[in-house]
Amino acid sequence: MTNTEDESWMGIALAEAKKGLGLTSPNPAVGAVIVRDGRELSRGWHRRCGQAHAEREALAALQPGEARGATIFVTLEPCSTPGRTGACCDVLIEAGLARVVYGIRDPNPDHAGKADELFLAAGIAVSSGVLEKECRHLIRGFEMTKTSGRPWVIAKTAISLDGRITRPPGEGQWLTGIGAREEVQCLRCEADAIITSGATVRADDPALTVRHSEAGERSRQPRRVVVTRSEHDWSRYRIFSDQDAGRSLLFRDQSLYDILRTLSDEYGICTVLVEAGGGLLGSFQDESLIDEWVIYLAPLVTGGPAVGLGGNGATTLASRTALRDLSIHQVGPDVCARGLVQRGKAPELER
């Protein structure tokens, strides 16, 4: 099988894995497809923590012995230690597969590469690194918890062309149009938790719920997290009074890093979405805790004091934040830019 064919089948496995975004934490989203002689036999994806892994779901769709001599493509190295559902390496060996192809090694150093040893000892060919960049992007939250002990942080803001979120008194809370707001609903589906500020809750009383009509099975409500320094009666706000109030969390007078560690360690959260005003976003930015930006630009110029991103800001050109893998698209009258924060030295400015 050629590299091009491997990438094509891995692309199908990636599409399966994406169905699990926002559903599987603290596990990663994983997809798999089983192939023989260029023909798909079955596919699967990991649906929830505690349920069958993608490899097991794909095998379960086949008759006993049907996978013998076939190839499985899976986005993440198959697990080599038994968890709630048993080690996937064992079941793949028992199924008699001839070849295992995976996209990225398990980021947990205790497990990384162990699958290769088991498969090769069983006479099964192994290939890895197929569409590795795409597979790594898919599990960036899971990898962040394993390597840094905190969730991946996506910062979202919607601002005017002059970088403001100023609104006249009594006007609705949105600057962007319906299309952009629907996209944000899908963005929320990717997150295990949505973080906002006490100031935003008091000003807007947001629901921060997943309400998109096309969200379907992925519409599990993320936890809602309020970060504040204030003593306040929060019970009257929707976050703490609606049907999902029991999953809402309040953190008062704690550092952002400690909050993120708690979300990871105690609640199994791998990815958070920060939806807040410029104050809290600026604090995350100043502490280098933002890993990804999603910025909506509305075709407005508002002026005024309410900025989309506050904080101390970059003190030098060298300390500014650069984005990589940037994508830009238009949605209705608005423009969305999304990219990953580039760690290390920022690129030189053209002069």
Image (cartoon, rainbow, N blue to C red):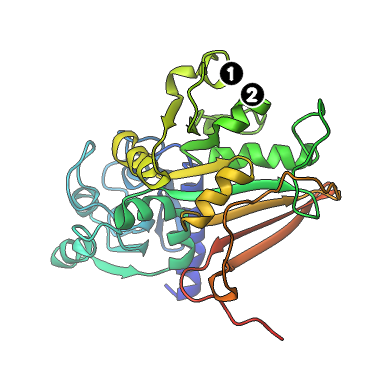
Residue at image position (60%, 82%) is: 348
- Horizontal side of residue 236 vs 331, given as left or right: left
Cα–Cα gap, marks 2 and 1: 6 Å
**Residue occupying the far left of the picture:** 121
Quadrant where the image shows the C terminus = bottom right
Residue at image position (49%, 69%) is: 5
Looking at the image, can residue 62 be seen? no
Q: Earlier in the sequence, mark 2 or mark 1?
A: 2
- Which residue in the structure is indicated by mark 1? 238
- Which residue in the structure is indicated by mark 2? 205
Identify residue type, mark 2.
Answer: Asp
Q: Residues within 10 Å of mark 1 (few under 14, many from 20)?
A: some
**Residue occupying the far bottom of the picture:** 351
**Residue 105 point in image, percent of width and height:** 31, 63
The quadrant holding residue 1 is bottom left
Looking at the image, can residue 201 be seen? yes
**Residue 26 point in image, percent of width and height:** 34, 41
Residue at image position (51%, 56%) is: 286
Q: Of 15 and 23, which appears nearest the observer?
A: 23
**Residue 285 point in image, percent of width and height:** 53, 55
Q: Of 134 and 276, which appears nearest the observer?
A: 276
Q: As displayed, is residue 97 above or below residue 131?
A: above
- Horizontal side of residue 94 vs 130, given as left or right: left
Q: Of 66 and 85, which appears nearest the observer?
A: 85
**Residue 31 point in image, percent of width and height:** 42, 50
